[in-house]
Amino acid sequence: MRIIRTIASMHVWSNRLRHSNRRIGFVPTMGYLHQGHLSLVKRSAEENDATVVSIFVNPLQFGPNEDFKKYPRTPKRDESMLREAGVDVCFYPSADRMYPAPYYTSVNVEYLTDTLCGRSRPGHFRGVATVVAKLFNIVKPHAAYFGQKDAQQAIVIKKMASDLNIDVDIKIMPIIRERDGLAMSSRNSYLNKYQREDAVILYKSLRMARRMINEGERSPGLIIGKIKGLITRRDSAKIDYCEIVDTKTLRPVAEIKGEVLIALAVYIGRTRLIDNFKMRVN
Ligand code: AMP
């Protein structure tokens, strides 16, 4: 596995691969890797001739009071996981190289970023869309792999790629979970033992919602009320949002019909966790 730190060297590597007609798969991450990330890597390795994984904790997508400083950074551990997974290149840019001063340009996907995480984290998706657009220009992948765990991010990136005519096939992979159902996340490492037990409530409440829908319930208000009731029974839990939205518009639905996303963001202590279920209802 090659470790590439400069943008110029990444360009050279990608141009060489493209000139020899080989397909590049790309998995952007912020590191502290887990099985969720590795599931994207595995799929990329299956579908492409070479896989690039980027590790970059992107300052642009963190708010001033968020966890940018304390976000876990474990480069040696991540590198050995990627080597074991058969990754070809680990791309490790620095913030100075990504955003040399003065830096003036950003990518903003409108409308889809006004809701859900976009409402709670102003500027977050502008940071995400900007870094992903830059990484696409640097890595020049044929396909890029994202997780359904960050459902709104996946939808925003797809729209950005299509609106800007970026010729990258965006693939969205299923959520990988711990044995008890908690969605894997680098931020789970912030949880203490009691909070870790409480955190499973996101998954449990989504399962309850899915069961209600499968049994014929079609009122979003009623289901959301039940989810909120279940979550607030846990001592450490505080709901940021709980919504049932249309997967195209990300706006709340009046009735559960078509393809909907049940989306949750919940603080467990000071750790903000997200999870979602996507469902198709006739
Ligand atoms: P992150 O390092 O948190 O920015 O995540 C990098 C990529 O991995 C994003 O596309 C995430 O959606 C994806 N990802 C994170 N957690 C999971 C998970 N539990 N299952 C599947 N994909 C995930």
Image (cartoon, grey):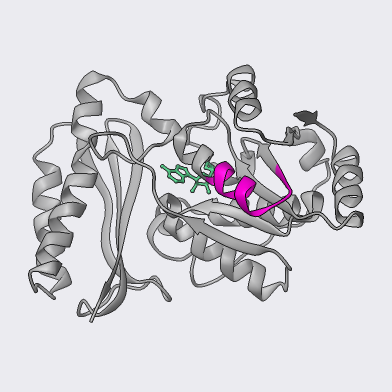
The residue lying at 21 percent from left, 53 percent from top is 206
193 over 149 or under it: above or below: above
The stretch in magenta equals 40-51
Asked whether residue 233 appears in the rendered view, the answer is yes
Quadrant location of the N terminus? top right
In the figure, is residue 137 to the left or right of 232?
right
In the figure, is residue 45 to the left or right of 174?
right
Magenta-highlighted stretch: main secondary structure? helix
User: Where residue 267 sits: x, y (%)?
Assistant: 29, 39
Is 154 part of what is drawn in magenta? no
User: Where residue 240 sits: x, y (%)?
Assistant: 29, 49
111 over 79 or under it: above or below: below
Asked whether residue 123 appears in the rendered view, the answer is no
Q: Of residues 42 and 147, which is closer to you in this image?
A: 42
Question: Which quadrant holds residue 163?
Answer: bottom right
The residue lying at 89 percent from left, 38 percent from top is 9
Q: Of residues 253 and 19, which is closer to you in this image?
A: 19
In the figure, is residue 243 to the left or right of 225?
right
User: Where residue 184 sits: x, y (%)?
Assistant: 38, 37
Q: Of residues 219 and 104, which is closer to you in this image?
A: 219
